[in-house]
Amino acid sequence: MQQPVSPAQRNRDNLAVEVKAASRVTIIGMILDAFLGIIKVIGGTLFHSQALLVDGIHSFTDVASDVVVLGVMKVSRQEPDDCHPYGHQRIETFGTLVLGSILIAVGAALAWENTLRLIEGDVDHIPEWPVLVAAAISVVGKEWIFRYTKHVGLAIRSDLIIANAWHSRTDALSSLVVLASTAGAMLGFVWLDMLAAVAIAVIIIHIGWKFTWDSVQELVDTGLSPDDTEMLKTIARETDGVLNVHELRSRRMGQDILLDIHLVVRPEISVSEGHQIGMQVVAGMRNALDNILDINFHIDAENDEDHEFATTEQLPSRAEVASIIAEHLGEIPQRSRLRLHYLRNKLHMEIFLDEQDPEAVFTPENVRQHLEAYPWFGSVRIWVAGL
């Protein structure tokens, strides 16, 4: 008989599959980037196209980013450990930040150099037709790897892989610019080649900035959008047993979402019923957003944001309450139970007697008379079995 797979083992298997898929698509992209980079740099140099040369340098930045992706994916997809109980996905976020920074730096350097050349009118030769061939090959190859990489990134829910896919898309777009500018330069508009080089550099900077800013937003624990937050609150409020939701905090870790939520329930229910209500809220939220990694719910008997919460010194513990009752009224009979409700900085008690109290010691009036002098005392109710 086949043994059931534990959640921990299933998670390890999923991580292994994701790393394998990410590594495969990244290696394929890296080989393609290296090939395109070589033909574009050589073609740009031999056939007098500054735009194609810059585009080739862009392809080599893709190779560098692929190396970063391979290293980061291997580390970020490790399973949680004692030091990182939520996993290592933030390493992926940091890798995306580094990748974006590289793009900004490379794009800025290329834009500056070619802007100076454009201003100075430093044009010696007109691009030749092999430049068109190299650019066309680049467009087809990079568009294919973009679609393939994005598909894998979405499948394994990896921002880093998706970012690398869009890096490839920028290369395809820049090659389109090379095609257009080369055709224009060959028709006599020789300055178009350098202008295209500047345009490609600006595209690189723009994509790099987007990756960098999104990663910074995640690293500073930016929450979900207002619409998604309100949607999750509505799911919680509509769950049977939930009276209100007075706090919901969210943050992202890679593609995963972490939530903290406070649920207000009826104060008289049991601890187990409160927990069950919380689990129903969790199930509803997971059905709405499938990338929720963890939901930490807190069960409240009241909305503690409405008033200042009393300190532990102001409200007695169960042992202290039992001692005070024993001092004034005697020990609570055996097989009887004491239930405490801490509401609005007062203590409300329920005493469940297993049988009728023949001496009438534990009556609401008598208990109230002995305890009402205490500032924390709120109310008392007595329940007798069989009545």
Image (tube, rainbow, N blue to C red):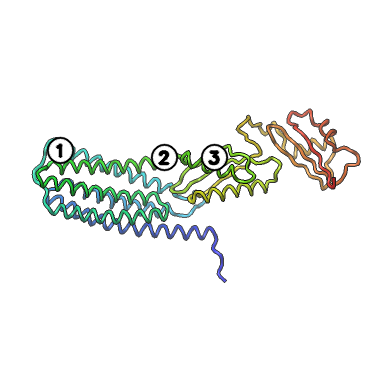
Q: Residue at x 79, y 41 (%)?
A: 351
Tell me the CA gap for discs 1 and 3: 54 Å
Q: Which residue is drawn at 68% across and 46% down?
A: 271
Regarding residue 264, the answer to whether it shows in the image is yes
Badge 1 marks a residue whose secondary structure is helix
Badge 3 marks a residue whose secondary structure is strand
Q: Earlier in the sequence, mark 2 or mark 1?
A: 1
Q: Residue 248 carries which label?
A: 3
- Kind of residue at disc 2: Gln
Q: Earlier in the sequence, mark 2 or mark 3?
A: 2
Circle 3 packing at 10 Å, graded few (<14), some (14-19), many (20+), is some
Q: Which residue is disc 2 drawn over?
A: 217
Q: Determine whether, in the image, residue 91 is placed left or right of residue 63.
A: right
**In front: label 2 or label 3:** 3
- Kind of residue at disc 1: Leu
Tell me the CA gap for discs 2 and 3: 19 Å
Q: Which residue is disc 1 drawn over?
A: 118
Name which quarter of the figure residue 299 lies in. Answer: top right
Quadrant into which the C terminus falls: top right
- Kind of residue at disc 3: Leu
Circle 1 packing at 10 Å, graded few (<14), some (14-19), many (20+), is some
Furthest residue in direction front, as rendered: 238
Q: Position of residue 148 (x, y in %)?
A: 33, 57
Q: Which residue is drawn at 63% across and 46% down?
A: 240
Q: Residue 341 carries which label?
A: none
